[in-house]
Amino acid sequence: MLLHIPGPALASEERLARPSLWKYRYPLFAFALLGILGLYQLAVVLLLSKSHTHIAKPFVGDSISNPYQNWNGEAGEKISLHAHSDEVWFTPERHTVNEIVSEYKKEGFANVAITDYGQISNTEDPNYIRGMEWGQNVKKRHILAIGIQKAFYDFFPIYASRENLNWVMDRMKQLGGYVILPHPKLFDSYSKEEMLALEGYQAVEVYSPFGDDTKILDSLLSVGKNVHCMASDDLHYFPEKIIQNFDQPFWKDWIQTLGHQRGRKGESFLRYIVTNAGAKDQVTVLQALNSGSFFCVKKFFQGADDPKVPQIHVNTKNQIQVNSTERYLEIRFIGKLGEVLQISPDTNSATYQILESDPYVRVELIALTGSIVSNAIVRSKSTE
């Protein structure tokens, strides 16, 4: 008995003593996934990029380019270009496309673009304006595309360099999109330096529920970036009094209540653009957007009358003539670096003489019920 050696027992003890990685399988699996994601992100950051190739120069020349020269009158078209519906899988509690379009049309809007995240949401309306909002990153560096032919994947869920954002905007333009930087003041998603370094966008939201700032335009125009203004509600939810009239399922009411979406004042119907009379379907709206022939409007409160947009002409003496049937509190002419060149108070008309030192001039109008921003009238070289 004393001479018995339990061989199997020793072998078992030897096996138990060997280190095993199986008990660490979950953290190892997590590290492997993070590694794959990191390699993927590094690969797309390096591969899907577009260098900054255009160096902006201040506007020069003896010709004056006025985007409103062929404007027909004050009876323009109200257009909303930034609204979100329930058609994205992670936003089922939001409003339907039909509800959004119906409510905006009740408020006199000629057309609405539904710009859902990462996809184009369609309607049966043949004049519907197609759109999408790109970007799901935490910093809210999103990009809007109006009139885009098809949506595409966000390849940069964690990080996107300026060159990556240039690539995205270039891709949007290849697909027929008019490119807008939305809500730049939200989380400081697009700083002044960022916007100066990027290229490919055509407009910036200067009127947004997340911050109104028309001076953004001057920092860009002053270095020769001929970008347009943009005004939008960035609609996520209607006010409570409108939601109560919707015939929506109980689960949607429940989610909206738990998410504290119910009872909010909402930002609907307050910020929009006005295009020329008749420019309300996708084709004519895109033409107006690309030429800058539209105004950006912000109403001061819901239910107020719409402030009337003016007619802006440049005569043979290089004078900007502003005329309207509405009497404004102020008509302001804004120049390089945001300098106020002239203020005409309590009037429905004003004239400003463009100076040789003015690379551009834009107009801001303050009415009783809202403010209006024009796109820039810029110098250009004669084609003759």
Image (cartoon, grey):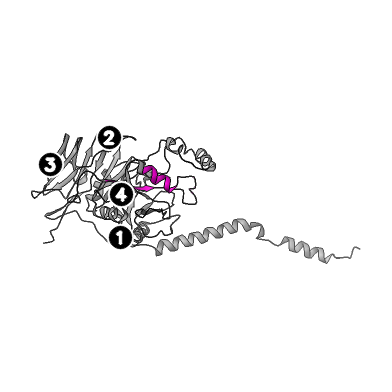
Q: Which mark is residue 369?
A: 2
Q: Nearer the viewer, mark 2 or mark 1?
A: 2
> First in sequence: mark 2 or mark 1?
1
- Reply above or below: 214 against 197: above
Give the Cα separation between the discs numbered 1 and 4.
18 Å
> First in sequence: mark 3 or mark 1?
1
**Residue type marked 2:** Thr
Give the Cα separation between the discs numbered 3 and 1.
39 Å
Residue bearing the label numbered 4: 204
Residue bearing the label numbered 1: 52
Q: Nearer the viewer, residue 175 or 24?
A: 175
**Residue type marked 1:** His
The picture places residue 8, in percent across and down from the top left corner, at: 82, 65
Quarter of the image with the N terminus is bottom right
The picture places residue 352, in percent across and down from the top left corner, at: 12, 43
Residue bearing the label numbered 3: 351
Q: Is residue 192 visible?
A: no
Is label 2 in a helix, a strand or a loop?
loop
